[in-house]
Image (cartoon, grey):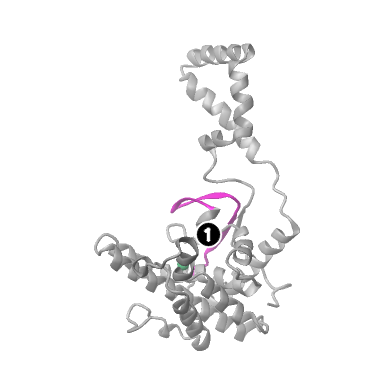
Amino acid sequence: MKWKGRRQSNNVDDRRGKGGAGQGIGGFNNPTLLAPLVKLLFSKVGLFIVGGFIIVSLVMGKNPLSLITQLLNAGVATETSAPYQPSAEDEELAQFSATILANTEDVWNKLLDNYREPTLVLFTGSVSSACGSASSATGPFYCPGDEKLYIDLSFFDEMERRLNAPGDFAQAYVIAHEVGHHIQKIMGTTDKMNRLRGQVSETEYNRYSVMLELQADFLAGVWAHHSQAMTKMMETGDLEEAMNAANAIGDDRLQKQSSGRVVPDSFTHGTSAQRMRWFKKGFDTGDLSQGDTFSATSL
Ligand SMILES: [Zn+2]
């Protein structure tokens, strides 16, 4: 992709190196911090300090344990806010992501009236969102509650190494897919889906979930179509990179990799073939009206 030197989005919330879900009490999981603390507590000095705390707390009318917890958390907070040093590679990925996000803004502002631009949150390790806290293992996701996309950039590395889906356009497809979920939120599709939860069987709900995911792939394709018309950013081999990624992250492929067997009823994203087909359909047509996966006779 010829992405360098283009506009980068301002809607990026860079939380890399800042922790997230792991803040506060979760800091106790940090073994390097815990060991010296335990040692200190059991030493004479420690007993003296704890005794001091209890007296101070009683004087201040506070629960001594909560005071100790507060102080420990203060220690944890300074520990995790040590300056984050991204590698040159990480920095390039961050700039790439901000550029692709800017490009999705340009495309969707053109296609939709009053487009509400989503925020991209970059994080490392864990993050809290309006949808709850998540770790990098969740993979990139979109939270309809706060209209933000969450990505730990190490996922791109994982795509390349573990899923065998390398390439910058494959990464752009992932971002565009999450933006696709944002388009679904704007169009009211996400709310419709939420109303279905609990009203239909799990198998049925999974079927709808596949339609939602395939539509996000279609919307990623629509983005690529218009992006190419506007910027000519794509190079030879880019489309194949996205198709290869869609192929690699199909439910059937992922299930086979993890459990060795495929259970279609539990699919929530669609098969590799379906994901490739809907992305391609969006890319070929660029026509939003072609993407109704919910009433398609066959997916
Ligand atoms: Zn998705």
Specify the quadrant that holds the C terminus: bottom left
Left or right position of 225 against 272: right
Q: Residues within 10 Å of mark 1 (few under 14, many from 20)?
A: some
Q: How many marks?
A: 1
Residue 2 locus on image (x, y percent):
70, 77
- Dividing the picture into quadrants, the one containing residue 12 is bottom right
Towards the viewer: 38 or 272: 272
Q: Determine whether 74 is above or below 263 in the image.
A: above
- Which residue is rendered at x = 50% and y = 64% of the image? 257
Magenta region's main secondary structure?
strand
Q: Determine whether 148 is above or below 285 in the image.
A: above
- Dividing the picture into quadrants, the one containing residue 170 is bottom right
Q: Which residues are magenta?
A: 116-135
**246 drawn magenta:** no
Left or right position of 127 against 299: right
Specify the quadrant that holds the N terminus: bottom right
Residue 238 locus on image (x, y percent):
63, 80
Left or right position of 287 against 72: left
Residue 186 locus on image (x, y percent):
42, 69
Furthest residue in direction right, as rendered: 88
Towards the viewer: 276 or 45: 276
- Which residue is rendered at x = 33% and y = 68% of the image? 265
Furthest residue in direction left, as rendered: 199
- Which residue is rendered at x = 48% and y = 25% of the image? 66
**Which residue is under mark 1?**
139
- Dividing the picture into quadrants, the one containing residue 75 is top right
Residue 98 locus on image (x, y percent):
64, 65
